[in-house]
């Protein structure tokens, strides 16, 4: 059944964006995605078609660079029928030369441009969702608070200046200050639409559609892909991590829930985390479930010490508000690997 709601998704061709569009179409929502080029838009439409989805429920608008002034004006102006906006587009990479220009400004200015365009042109918009991150909630490295309980109310203490010190801090700061910008925007303009903020931890899980190029996946899935590549090439294992994970299908599900009529997520900030993850744990799952896949040796002494790095996430409120069970690590890793090796 086709719904009478029209959802705009920025960053529709991203890892998370693709899953959101897929789930929305499966539920009969009309979708309008922002993509960077006609080629990307047409390719994505083809992927939807090949997957047997109702691709006519997807159209796209070109937004080449979210950091340019008024980046979303034309898209919102052309589609007064939009009822909901999901702003997922933001740079998620550590391979940058200019931290401020390539990470901080696109995230912060892109959020402001998206919200300003909705305020000015989105006369039928009722709900806005921004994809923030656990990076906006917790401090990392020198700013970590090991053992401290963190909830949906917490903020990463990183400053704008600290964010410019290296690409990792640049990404952390980009998510914190974009999230802050959204909060300030709503406080200042008191729009008629509600704002929901979604803060996922590391997002794993299969790509929404067939992977055409397996040499490099999106940044978070490279944690898993990097292990397989190192095992195959007999090269050094990737840097080991500790942290928390959530499956991409649950991240998309939360975005979709936030635009479903009658939901109670307006005004909420959600932390999407299923539970803890370490590189060693991922390797253990792969070793058990895919014993023929060669893996690199992981030196336990080179793994970060959980007790010295990680805060404790308390996302009880998020779980209650969402009301669905998150996919566990084994399922997420297994489904990711199956798609990589197929
Ligand atoms: P992704 O695959 O890299 O997707 C990012 C999307 O944003 C892509 O569509 C990308 O377009 C677009 N984008 C980036 N910079 C842009 C710019 N300057 N102008 C226009 N478009 C731009 O990453 P993802 O994992 O799906 O991330 C989506 C969102 O989730 C981001 O806000 C990210 O911070 C957040 N998040 C991700 C994770 C995770 O572990 N994956 C965890 C927490 C939060 P192109 O592909 O064309 O470059």
Image (tube, rainbow, N blue to C red):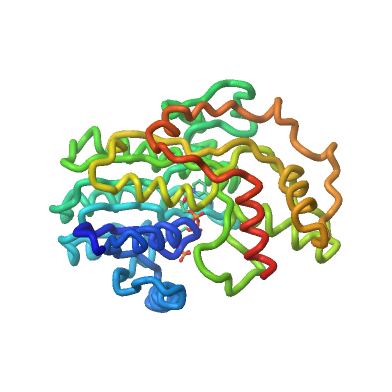
Considering depth in this image, is 211 or 131 the residue closer to the camera?
211
Q: Is residue 156 left or right of residue 72?
A: right
| Relative image position of residue 296 (x, y in whole percent) | 83, 55
Most distant residue in the top direction: 148
Whether 54 is drawn above or below 68: the answer is: below
Whether 316 is drawn above or below 171: the answer is: above
Task: Give the position of the N terminus as an image quadrant.
Answer: bottom left
Residue at x 57%, y 41% (from the top left corner) = 169
In which quarter of the view is residue 270 placed?
Answer: top left
Q: How many marks?
A: 0
Most distant residue in the left direction: 123
- Is residue 334 visible in the rendered image? The answer is yes
Task: Give the position of the C terminus as an image quadrant.
Answer: bottom right
Residue at x 46%, y 48% (from the top left corner) = 251
In which quarter of the view is residue 328 placed?
Answer: top right
Residue at x 70%, y 41% (from the top left corner) = 278
Q: Is residue 244 left or right of residue 43?
A: right
Whether 184 is drawn above or below 248: the answer is: above
Q: Is residue 229 left or right of residue 86?
A: right
Considering depth in this image, is 323 or 209 the residue closer to the camera?
323
| Relative image position of residue 164 (x, y in whole percent) | 54, 43
Residue at x 54%, y 36% (from the top left corner) = 162
Q: Is residue 229 left or right of residue 133?
A: right
- Is residue 184 visible in the rendered image? The answer is no
In which quarter of the view is residue 68 placed?
Answer: bottom left
| Relative image position of residue 309 (x, y in whole percent) | 67, 30
């Amino acid at each position: 059944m086709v719904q009478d709601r029209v959802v705009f998704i920025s960053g529709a061709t991203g890892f998370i964006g693709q899953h959101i569009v897929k789930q929305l179409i499966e539920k009969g929502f009309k979708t309008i995605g922002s993509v960077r080029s006609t080629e990307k838009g047409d390719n994505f439409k083809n992927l939807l078609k090949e997957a047997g989805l109702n691709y006519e429920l997807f159209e796209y608008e070109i937004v080449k660079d979210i950091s340019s002034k008024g980046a979303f004006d034309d898209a919102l102006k052309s589609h007064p029928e939009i009822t909901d906006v999901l702003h997922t587009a933001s740079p998620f990479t550590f391979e940058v030369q200019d931290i401020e220009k390539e990470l901080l400004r696109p995230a912060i200015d892109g959020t402001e441009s998206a919200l300003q365009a909705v305020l000015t042109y989105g006369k039928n918009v009722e709900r806005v969702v921004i994809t923030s991150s656990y990076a906006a909630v917790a401090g990392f490295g020198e700013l970590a608070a090991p053992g401290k309980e963190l909830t949906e109310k917490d903020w990463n203490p990183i400053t704008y200046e600290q964010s410019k010190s290296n690409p990792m801090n640049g990404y952390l700061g980009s998510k914190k200050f974009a999230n802050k910008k959204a909060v300030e925007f709503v406080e200042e303009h008191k729009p008629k639409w509600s704002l929901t903020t979604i803060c996922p931890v590391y997002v794993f899980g299969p790509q929404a559609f067939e992977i055409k190029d397996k040499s490099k996946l999106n940044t978070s899935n490279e944690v898993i892909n990097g292990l397989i590549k190192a095992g195959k090439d007999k090269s050094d294992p990737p840097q080991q991590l500790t942290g928390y994970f959530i499956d991409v299908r649950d991240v998309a599900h939360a975005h979709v829930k936030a635009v479903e009529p009658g939901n109670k997520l307006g005004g909420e900030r959600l932390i999407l985390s299923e539970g803890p993850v370490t590189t060693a744990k991922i390797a253990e799952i792969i070793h058990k479930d895919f014993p023929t896949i060669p893996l690199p040796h992981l030196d336990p002494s080179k793994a970060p010490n959980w007790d010295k790095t990680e805060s404790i996430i308390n996302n009880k409120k998020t779980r209650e508000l969402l009301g669905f069970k998150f996919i566990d690590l084994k399922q997420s890793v297994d489904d990711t690997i199956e798609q990589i090796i197929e």
